[in-house]
Image: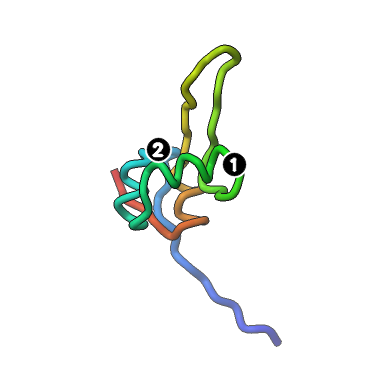
């Protein structure tokens, strides 16, 4: 019989975790994290760029950040 493991998960709210906060928690630069999201190398959030826009917008939901990086901060 297979042993079961139960883990308590944080109370996710869908909060958009700022890239700078993730950078501080992981020890990686914000630029590195933004580029990794743009290139699809990392999967803790999304990078959007509207047609004709020059800047990207980033959305990093707290649950996805926790699942991919193990970081969570309750707000």
Please tell me which residue lies in front, 58 or 65: 58
Tell me the crowding category of disc 1: few under 14, some 14 to 19, or many 20 or more residues within 10 angstroms, Cα based: few
Q: Is residue 45 above or below residue 10?
A: above
Residue 29 place in picture, x, y as percent: 36, 48
Residue 5 place in picture, x, y as percent: 55, 76
Q: In this view, does 53 lie above or below 15?
A: above
Residue 24 place in picture, x, y as percent: 30, 51
- Kindly identify which numbered label has been placed on residue 39: 1
Which image quarter holds the C terminus? top left
Q: Is residue 10 above or below residue 13?
A: below
Q: Which residue is label 2 attached to?
A: 15
Q: Quadrant of residue 30 in the image? A: top left
Please tell me which residue lies in front, 2 or 68: 68
Residue 9 place in picture, x, y as percent: 44, 59
Q: Residue at x 56, y 17 (%)?
A: 50
Which image quarter holds the N terminus? bottom right
Describe the element under mark 2 as helix, strand or loop: loop
């Amino acid at each position: 019989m297979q042993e079961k493991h139960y883990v308590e998960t944080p109370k996710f709210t869908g909060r958009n975790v700022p890239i700078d906060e993730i950078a501080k928690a992981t020890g990686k630069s914000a630029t590195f994290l933004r580029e990794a999201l743009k290139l699809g190398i990392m999967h803790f959030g999304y990078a959007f760029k509207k047609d004709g826009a020059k800047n990207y917008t980033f959305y990093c939901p707290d649950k996805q950040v926790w699942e991919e990086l193990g970081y969570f901060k309750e707000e």
